[in-house]
Amino acid sequence: MKLSHIGMILLLGACSVDKGEVSPPVNPPTPEPSLPHNGVIKASQLTIHGQYVPKEGLVSKYGRLPKSLESSTDQDLKNIKDHGLHTDSAGLYIAFETDAKSIKFDFTLKGGNTSSEANDETESGFDLYSLENGKWESVQDFHLVNHTDPYEVNSTYNNVSGTTKKYILIFPLYNGVGDEEFTLTIPKEAKFYDRDFFGEDKRKPILIYGTSITQGTRPTRVGLAYTSRLLFDQEREIINMGFSANAWMCKDMTDYVTDIPSAVFFIDPTMNMEMVKDIPKSKRNAENMIRTYRKKHPRTPIVMVSQFDGRLTVAANGTEGTYGEAMKEVVEKLQKEGIKNLYFLSRDNFIPEPGIKGNGTKDYIHPGDEGMKGYANKHNEILKTIKPDESK
């Protein structure tokens, strides 16, 4: 066919289009509205992640235990309240997206109490993460410096690139954000969005009940605690029910913790068992916690964590320790009775070699940065082998 004929055919084809079949122009989607602000974003405008009970029902707005447990006489809850651990903000964070070129954070903490098991960075520190090239990276951390009232913590982050970015700000592990309304100050022209990066598909959180290791003692900043690492590794909200020196699994605490729906439930109580030296009671309490959770949540995997020991090396592995063995016996007993989706996490290689002071731990008990990394890795390993409960 000659080219002139081809051109004529194309021209005729173009002229023969029925104008009635032309698709109407597609309207662009309506832009999502930014949170209203005049240069200040208030706490009341933001979602607090990592809480099970809405802040109105908590003893402290940015704490972890409800008012309903205030009158409990359980020993573990009494200890928790006496030391103010229930108002600590371990595991809490805010998530947001903004094009602000600068963000000024202004917080007031609940108090200037100090813990022998933490440092300023984890006790009263914040850790700001940003999604950089598809990976969450710590871009700034800051902490309480002046331990005298009013315990104010403030810092300014400058977004040098000036581009829209996603952020997560992790709260202190061993102190609590005061009930006063904290603020984020940004340029008046900046756009700001409250986000839920890890829960937009309504996935359930990972629930972890434990001791000071779970609460987050000893890493050099809050983002390096193993629970914080899991937040980013699993891209799933973490409910941190770790209370320093208080994982007794008593009745009232068990009743509360087992109410929390989760994708996976980790129980990590063994580091406190040596303090009471009552293995039979600990086994009864652990058995009750597992049975109670399974009754309320038939499909959720339950993982009992073995006894951590910072002095462990590869050569020393192979045994679970006195209290780890006790918890292993509970798990095996209940498995034989037919309780399914129940697992035991061995302590083998909990921390990388060498498992020595200054590397794996700071005091042979609490993991430091390397130990926390190893702790997170062990949890990540078992999470690869079990199926989380995604039922609504």
Image: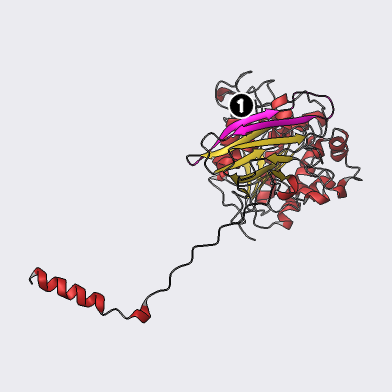
From the top left corner, tell me how far across and down residue 233 is, in percent.
56, 41
Give the magenta-colored segment's residue range. 134-158
Q: Which of 365 and 101 is in front in this view?
A: 101
Left or right of residue 135, residue 356 in this image: right
**Residue occupying the point 74% across, 27% down:** 144
**Secondary structure of residue under mark 1:** helix
Instruction: Residue 143: give x, y in percent of width and height.
Output: 71, 28
| Residue 309 vs residue 86, the one in the foreground | 86
Q: Locate the C terminus by quadrant.
A: bottom right
Please tell me in which quadrant of the rendered image residue 99 appears.
top right
Give the x, y percent position of residue 21.
36, 79
Three-letter code, disc 1 = Asp
The reply to whether residue 6 is visible in this rendering is: yes
**Residue 382 appears in view:** no
The residue that mark 1 highlights is 369
- Residue at image position (60%, 54%) is 200
State whether residue 293 is above or below residue 218.
Answer: below
Q: For residue 80, what is the image quadrant? A: top right
Quarter placement of the N terminus: bottom left
Name the dominant secondary structure of the magenta segment: strand
Residue drawn at (19%, 73%) of the image: 10
Question: Is residue 337 found left or right of 82 in the rendered image?
Answer: left
On whether residue 120 falls in the magenta region, the answer is no
